[in-house]
Image (cartoon, grey):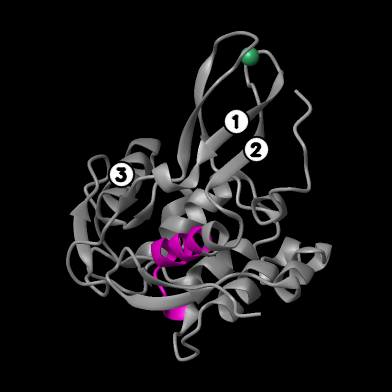
Amino acid sequence: MELYTEKATLPSGLECTIREMTATEEGFLASPKMLKSGEAFEKILRNCIVEKDIDLDNLLVGDRYYLMLAIRRLSFGDDYDFKVRCGSCGHTFSVNINLADLPVKKLEGDPDATHTITLPRTGKKVTFRLLRGRDEKKISSTLRKTPQEIIRLSLLLHTIAVDGDENFSEKFFETLPGADSQFYRKEIDAVTCGVDTVVEASCPECDDEFDVQLPINEYFFFPGTRKSKS
Ligand SMILES: [Zn+2]
């Protein structure tokens, strides 16, 4: 049987061809070890991108997310159901979205461009670049993962120089005031390309509304295996 293929234009403007998933790729998702390390998703990308000369480590993170979504949509369609737990009342409920509706932000300018900004609180000048696949791997291989640690590591990996010095200390990010950290993240977001994977959820029990990060996990690629109970 001939597999479905599709041309994709990535947020950075790069073009490639993807193919639908097969039982081989589904097998990667059945391995808890490969799921936990992120290797399963890496292998899905590798197998389902037809052009084998595309360097996944060098792809922008925004392009990689876009590809994961495109492969999922080509293989299983646009409909995605996932579970969310309400932070206010603890109720767990299903959210249904159409993956085709997620906004995609295109890259403006050169993917290799660097940006220099001045942090409002400390007055430090930081120079940053966009993250690539190899950076994402460093984040996903970090063992202790509190949200604060992920933010700190992400900022560290974005940073090329502090006040023009490329040999800046990692400690800089441990003592960075909250106002600077937040400002820095906003400046990065402003130039980052990719799919907006934050969706709005509304709790049917208490009517609380909140944002959730679209879960990209084994169920994302196995839409039929987990029936909603709520
Ligand atoms: Zn609730």
Q: Which mark is residue 82?
A: 2
Which of the marked residues, 1 or 3, is nearer the chain's N terminus? 1
Q: Is residue 16 left or right of residue 83?
A: left
Q: Residue at x 65, y 62 (%)?
A: 142
**For numbered disc 3, what is the local secondary structure?**
helix
Which residue is disc 3 drawn over? 186
**Assess mark 3: CB under 8 A from ligand 1?**
no
Left or right, 78 with reference to 205: left
Q: Which mark is residue 142?
A: none
The total number of labels drawn is 3
Q: Nearer the viewer, residue 212 or 144?
A: 212
Q: Amino acid at mark 2?
A: Phe
At label 1, the amino acid type is Val
**Predominant secondary structure, magenta span:** helix
Say what amino acid the circle numbered 3 marks. Lys
> Mark 2 and mark 1 in contact (Cβ < 8 Å)?
yes
Q: Kindly state the secondary structure of the residue where label 1 is placed.
A: strand
Query: Measuring 63% from the left and 67% from the top, which residue is drawn there?
Result: 41
- Between discs 1 and 2, the one toward the N terminus: 2
Q: Which residue is mark 1?
A: 95
| Magenta highlight range | 57-70
